[in-house]
Image: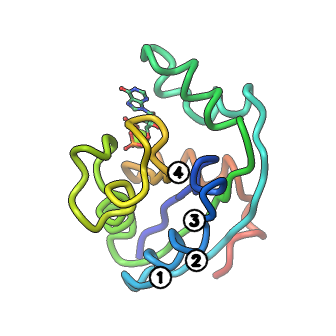
Amino acid sequence: MQRTLSIVKPDGVQKNLIGEVISRFEKKGLRIKALKMLHVTKEQAKKFYIVHKEKPFYDDLTNFLSEGPIVVMVIEGEDAIAKVRETMGATNPKEAAPGTIRADFATDIERNIVHGSDSPESAAYEIPFFFSAVEIMD
Ligand code: IDP
Ligand code: MG
């Protein structure tokens, strides 16, 4: 069993896709173990995406993540990290496989609806960033 963090980003919430994203994960047999909606500040977005601080898109990306409400969730299952990433599709929707969330709904490489941890190390940083132990169901 593995845990991962996923986010319905501000564009996904704005496009009314919260249920659609969750449903796609559930249909893969993954389980939601924690869930909440919040609106992060620019400073919090910068901290969350600290691995990208040297990237040219860091400023835009952190403006985007903090522009409106997001839904954050802890997802659990066998190979949850890879399964969530497969369900999301490639970062750039033009390269995302047909039937993935990003292929179906993303606007562009930045406004791509959904986040998923890319490794166990990322999940270990991202899950406690948003959730305390008592907020995650056993
Ligand atoms: P991922 O979300 O598929 O893991 P990352 O490379 O970790 O992709 O990038 C984090 C987020 O930064 C992306 O989901 C997207 O919103 C944004 N991003 C990535 N690459 C670019 C880019 O080249 N231009 C603008 N935004 C980008
Ligand atoms: Mg990433």
Q: Earlier in the sequence, mark 4 or mark 2?
A: 2
* In front: label 2 or label 3: 3
Q: Earlier in the sequence, mark 4 or mark 3?
A: 3
For label 3, the SS is loop
Q: In 3D space, how far apart are the residues under numbered discs 4 and 1 (Cα atoms)? A: 22 Å
- Could you tell me residue 43's position as x and y percent? 74, 26
Can residue 121 be seen at all in this image of the molecule? no
Which amino acid type is shown beneath numbered disc 1? Glu
Q: Are marks 1 and 2 in contact (CB under 8 Å)?
A: yes
- Could you tell me residue 130's position as x and y percent? 70, 52
Q: Quadrant of the N terminus?
A: bottom left
Q: In 3D space, how far apart are the residues under numbered discs 4 and 2 (Cα atoms)? A: 17 Å
Which amino acid type is shown beneath numbered disc 2? Ile
Residue at image location 39% in from the left, 64% down from the top: 84
In front of the other: 86 or 79: 86
For label 2, the SS is strand
Q: Which mark is residue 32?
A: 2
Q: Which mark is residue 115?
A: none
For label 1, the SS is helix
Q: In 3D space, how far apart are the residues under numbered discs 1 and 3 (Cα atoms)? A: 14 Å
**Quadrant of residue 8 in the image?**
bottom right
**Quadrant of residue 102 in the image?**
bottom left
Where 17 sits versus 7, above or below? below
The residue under label 1 is: 26
Residue at image location 42% in from the left, 17% down from the top: 55
Q: Is mark 1 within 8 Å of ligand 1?
A: no
The residue under label 4 is: 124
Is 30 displayed left or right of 12 in the figure? left
Q: Earlier in the sequence, mark 1 or mark 3?
A: 3
Which amino acid type is shown beneath numbered disc 3? Leu
